[in-house]
Image (cartoon, helix red, strand yellow):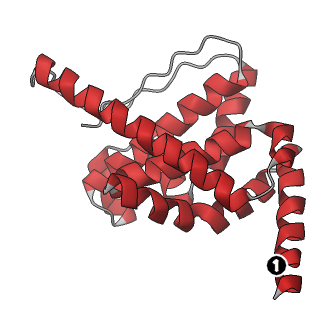
Amino acid sequence: MITHLNENVVAECALLSKVADGDHQAFREIYQKYHNKIYTFSIRILHSQLLAEEVVQESMLKLWLMGPAVLNINNLDSYLKRIARNCAIDLLKRKELELKTDRKLGNTWEESHNETEEQILLNDVRKILNDGVSLLPQQQKLVYQLCHLEGLKYEEAANRLKLSVLTVQSYMKLALRFLRNYINAHTDIVVFLIIFKLF
């Protein structure tokens, strides 16, 4: 048992070392290993599948952005749970603020979906965007590619992927939030992303 635990620790340290060097595949392995743990932990706090998935994304993004500092992590499981807990609390506070704002504004906005592309003209920013897309979970990546790159409407993407329109909207929201944070963290250039209104 102890030997097995030691082997896991060694394997995890090796993955973190690769993540510190910017290895996307190592990051995906950690993402796949801890996704369900963080999701289950978060849903107990938030009681929402969508918000729990959002916490998973934000937690993993923070891990990725640490760079070489990930080598200082002694217990990845505990570390990710701590990040997830903080993200969940921040999310609850943000949602409470959004509800208050919505009540003040009322239902005055007419929501629509347009096939609008972000006008990112600089090649280095395009590369950063593509790197971010490559890190998206498979379903979010598919929705992003269909709706945002191919210009399909949510209904069309939902039919093609055999998902509900609400699920497609949720995946797009998570993907765009992840990409916006990823780009902002990886460039000093001021980039304005045109984010679809999803609700």
* Image spot of residue 6 (x, y percent): 88, 76
User: Mark 1 — residue?
Assistant: 5
- Outermost residue on the front side: it is 2
Q: Which residue is at 75% across, 23% downward?
A: 124
> Of 91 and 86, which appears nearest the observer?
86
* Image spot of residue 155 (x, y percent): 27, 51
Horizontal relation, residue 169 to residue 6: left or right: left
Above or below, 126 relative to 152: above
Above or below, 44 relative to 187: below
* Image spot of residue 66 (x, y percent): 76, 37
Horizontal relation, residue 69 to residue 173: left or right: right
Please tell me how crowded label 1 is: few (under 14), some (14-19), or many (20+) other residues with Cα within 10 Å. few
> Of 193 and 147, which appears nearest the observer?
193
Q: Quadrant of the C terminus?
A: top left
Q: Quadrant of residue 179?
A: top right
Q: Which residue is at 27% across, 60% downward?
A: 164
Horizontal relation, residue 76 to residue 38: left or right: right
